[in-house]
Amino acid sequence: MILKQFIPEAYTQSPEKGYVSWRSPSNIALVKYWGKHGEQLPKNTSISFTLSNCATETILKFQRKEGADFDFQVLLDGKREANFEPKIEQFFSRIEAYLPFLRNYSFTIETSNSFPHSSGIASSASGMSALACCLMQMERMMVASDISEGLFNQRASFLARLGSGSASRSIEGPLVVWGEHSDIEGSSNLFGVKFDDEVHENFSNYQDTILLVDKGEKVVSSTAGHDLMHNHPYAAQRFEEANRNISRIKEILKTGDLKEFIEIVESEALQLHAMMMTSMPYFILMKPNTLEIINKIWKFRKETNSNACFTLDAGANVHLLYPEIEKTTVHQFISEELAQYCKNGEYIHDFTGNGASELKV
């Protein structure tokens, strides 16, 4: 189904060649999205922290061409990455109705990640959102009227979603909601929206250290994992619980109740993995060291009254979330007790950020 409100006005300019560049971060969901329908639409609402340090930088070079086929190549850290190209082909096919200039240009997509290659951190959210912003920047060159920042971000999120659902949450920050919910004004299944309700200072500049338990390709792709929800015996209950947790976390973000925040965030992480362990086929994506870290966090919290907590993506790595005021003590805890459970002792310190930004190159 083509959504007419996202089809651009007629183009008045047609640049011969050029380039644009954007940087876009990854994000970590607090209330998880797991299960989709239609064309990249979520079965439940999600909310995430936008990160700062874990990001993708993309340079999109373009040259006018003849012929009707899509024409592009992808370079990762300067080297051709043909394995990425089928996903870009699918992405271009999905967004062509909304960016009708795509077949008129040859593209070189030069991309690099700030986090280590094959670190186990999903780069689809940062990569697809950076590419979506580059394409929107191209469109800015072609239309007569100015595209406002709000419209740019909405359309970039809409496009990014068609490449990777979670990419819709990387355009803005520090908190972004994706999925229609009666308690979140302006929320939509079509794009992410910045969470503009009141947020307590406890959540300002919130910290996230990613503990790299497993560096490598995931056992099951996110797409395959989402598909397993179609016939899952507990899917309906999971979607209802996630939407209830959106209402709860909205109030928690307002009041600053860190104990309640911990309860929701950790239960959401475990529910995500429970759904994978009870699907058919079933998967266990956590590793022994994932569980070692979780138990260490629980013990540390009990002994010190810390507000550090964990969340997980669809993999073995652990995101350790904590207020900025605890940064010194938590960093000491990580280096002394958690690093030993990380592959090669590696982890990445990060914090909440404000989303994608244009780069001048």
Image (spheres, rainbow, N blue to C red):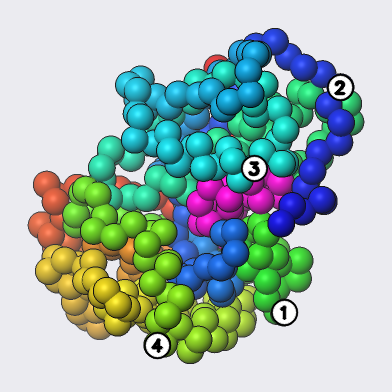
- Please report the residue visible at 56 percent of the width from the left and 73 percent of the height from the top: 43
C-alpha separation, residue under disc 1 versus residue under disc 4: 26 Å
Foreground mark, 1 or 4? 4
Mark sitting earlier along the chain (3/1): 3
Q: How far apart are the two marked residues, 2 and 1, measured between alpha carbons?
A: 39 Å
Dot placed on the residue nearer the N-terminal end, 3 or 2: 2
The answer to whether residue 43 shows anywhere in this view is: yes
Q: From mark 3 to mark 1, how far is it between C-alphas?
A: 28 Å
Name the residue carrying label 2: 12
Q: Residue 123: which quarter of the image?
A: top left
How far apart marks 3 and 2 lie (CA) works out to 20 Å
Magenta highlight range = 153-177
Q: Is residue 29 left or right of residue 187?
A: left
Secondary structure at badge 3 equals: helix
State which quadrant residue 114 falls in: top left
The residue carrying mark 1 is 182
> How many other residues sit within 10 Å of disc 4, few (<14), some (14-19) or many (≥20)?
few
Asked if the magenta segment contains residue 168, the reply would be: yes
Residue contact between numbered discs 2 and 1, judged by CB atoms under 8 Å: no
| Residue underneath mark 3 | 95
Please give the name of the residue rendered at 71% of the width and 67% of the height, measured from the top-left corner: 187
Q: Amino acid at mark 4?
A: Pro
